[in-house]
Every structure is written in structure tokens, then in C-alpha cells.
Amino acid sequence: MFINFVINKYSNIIMKKISIATVRLFIVTASVLLSAVCAVPAFAQQQEKEKTPEEVAAVDVKAMVSELGLSESQEFFCDSILTHNYTCMKSDFENLQSSGMQEASTYQFLKDRWQKKTLEALKKVLDDQQYIKYLRRIGKGKEYKRGKDGKFYLKSDLEKEKNKK
């Protein structure tokens, strides 16, 4: 009788401890599985291949067509220019990387050089307003401001006009 009493009394305590341990185990297991499930897509995104220069150029030209209102011939020339320059820039970066160059300033110099070449080529293809819009799109046209007529002008020219009145 005493043994039955002890077993009944302590079996409830043991069952409570087991159930608490089971719940804790379940929570830990669920959180580990959840984090693993969430980590798989993030890892898969990291494993996606890098876009080719042609793909990057195509995306940029598509944006330029919609933002700058390019004609078909301008679209063709811009696509050719960007594809060529992005391909050459990537090749230069790969050559630097294979030679063991790790200085960020060297890579920045190369990027700036290719951006300058791209701007020089695009200036020949785009009209003045399209070129200024492109400069502003890439963050280089800070010296231009939109006038009351909707066109872009040098800020200094707008201030001179304002002072004349």
C-alpha cells in the first residue's frame, strides 16, 4: 500500500517533469527546424549566379528607355556601349583579382575610368536633356536642377536668371 501511494504521488511529479521536458524538447526542435527552413532559401539566394555584363546592360538599357524616352536607335547604341564597357570592366576586374591586387582604390580607379568612358560615349548618343537625366540617375548630375519649364539647367544659370528678375 505504501508503495502504491509513493508510486501514485511521485508518478504525477515525474509525468509533469517529463511533459515539461517534452515541451521544451519540442520547442527547441521546432525552432531549430524553423531556422533551418528559413536558412535554406537565404543560402540558395547566395548561391545564385552573378549576372553577366550583358544582363546588367540589358536591365540598365530597359530602365533608360523608360526614364529617358530613348528612340530605337538610341536604345541600340546605348545597349552596345554598356555591354562593351561592362564586359571590358569586368575583364579588367578579373585580371586585377587574378594578379592578387586587393587595394580598393585600384578597383575604384578602374570603375571611374570605365564610367568616364561610358559617359563620353553616351554623350554622343543622347541629347542634352537625356544626358543630364542619365547623369542624375547615376548620381553625377548634382549641378543640374529642373527649371520651371521642366528642363534641366545648371544651378548657377538658374540663379543668374532669378537674380535678373
Image (cartoon, grey):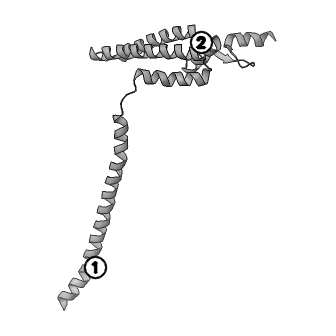
Find numbered disc 2 in the image and state the secondary structure of the residue it sits on: loop
Q: Residue at x 72, y 20 (%)?
A: 150
Of 97 and 165, nearer the camera is 97
Q: Residue furthest right?
A: 165
- Residue toward you, 160 or 58: 58
State the quadrant of the C terminus.
Answer: top right
Query: Residue 97 location in percent, x, y?
Result: 30, 17
Amino acid on which disc 1 is placed: Asn
**Looking at the rendered structure, which numbered label has been put on residue 33?**
none
For the question of whether residue 57 can be seen, the reply is: yes
Q: What residue is drawn where x is 62% and y is 20%? A: 69
| Mark 2 nearby-residue class (10 Å; few <14, some 14–19, many ≥20) | many
Instruction: Judge by depth and name the residue closer to the eye, 118 or 30.
Output: 118
CA separation, marks 1 and 2? 83 Å
Q: Residue at x 72, y 17 (%)?
A: 147
To which residue does mark 1 refer? 12
User: Which image quadrant is residue 153 in?
Assistant: top right
Q: x and y percent of residue 114 in the render?
A: 44, 12
In this view, the mark in front (1 or 2) = 2
* Neighbours of disc 1 within 10 Å: few (<14), some (14-19), many (20+): few
Q: What residue did someone put label 2 on?
A: 126
Does residue 140 appear in the picture of this structure? no
